[in-house]
Amino acid sequence: MSYHSLLGLKSEPFSISPDPAFFYRSPGHSSALQRLEINIRMKRGLSLILGDVGTGKTTLGRVLLQAFQNEPEYEFHLILNPLYQSEFQFLEALCKMFRVGTGAWRSTMDCLEALETYLYQKHSVEGKTTVLLVDEGQNLSLNLIEVLRSLLNYETNEHKLLQLVVLGQLEALPRFVRIRNFMDRVNMKYMINPFDPEETKKMIRYRLAQSGLKPGQTLFTDEALAVIVDATQGYPRRRVTFLCQRMLEELLQPKQSVWWTGP
């Protein structure tokens, strides 16, 4: 029997996996999602979401995907980690992801021309919006940033043909700034911050409720919540979730001390 079932829960409340069902919509995260959705629906092009490690960027991206899942006029494509060795490898991967052409791409120019034709067909003939979501954007090399800049050049008189969302750590910003023409195309730039103390407590209660904790019940005292706030500084992924997970496990082993060995 799992530890969470022994505590009266139906599922693991503090997994570090990016499950949209456990995404706590803080004011900051809700604002980011709302602005992203508007940018995509208005076909404005490039949106940039930056934040420290563990602030919930990846989960935010999954929630964004979920928001459009029942709208067939939007086609989303996800790159989990853009670790490509060359421009051609990256473009070839995009062509395969978008199912462009027959696979006979000999050069970056072949790929770019095929992608332009594909995006125009989707937008102007089929009436669909193509969205590319790039996670771990701090791993984009300067050459790959240039490729994305080139793709953002494809547009009609009114709209960008590709809607691009890049999620990355703060360390990515200096690299993006070096490609001035890339930053000039940013329509939305948003910084995700850690939770404040009250948001951290609300996130913990929300996750417990999502896991089946009955209304009026609690597994953390006010003192315990204060310790979590102080120890984690409001970083939801790994810090808050990891510490809460360890503390719940220790509830079943009252004679042992609680040690936090997280990052």
Image (cartoon, grey):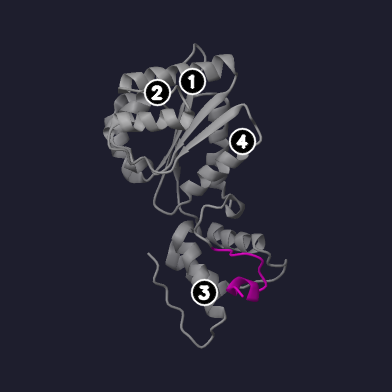
Residues at badges 2 and 4 in contact (C-beta under 8 Å)? no
Mark 3 or mark 1: which comes first in sequence?
Answer: 1
**Direction right: furthest residue:** 215
Q: Identify the mark at residue 44; answer none if there is no mark.
A: none
The percent position of residue 219, horizontal first and vertical second, equals 62, 73
Residues at badges 1 and 4 in contact (C-beta under 8 Å)? no
Q: Secondary structure at mark 2?
A: helix
Task: Tell me which residue sits at (54%, 69%) in the image.
Answer: 225
Q: Secondary structure at mark 1?
A: helix
Please say whether residue 3 is one of the residues in the magenta stretch. yes
Residues at badges 2 and 3 in contact (C-beta under 8 Å)? no
Q: Which residue is mark 3?
A: 247
Q: Is residue 180 above or below residue 22?
A: above
Q: Which residue is mark 2?
A: 151
Residues at badges 1 and 2 in contact (C-beta under 8 Å)? yes
Mark 2 or mark 3: which comes first in sequence?
Answer: 2
**Direction top: furthest residue:** 157
Q: Secondary structure at mark 3?
A: helix
Quadrant housing the C terminus: bottom left
* Distance CA(mark 2)–CA(mark 3): 47 Å
Amino acid at dot 2: Leu
* Distance CA(mark 2)–CA(mark 4): 22 Å
Task: Tell me which residue sits at (37%, 20%) in the image.
Answer: 112
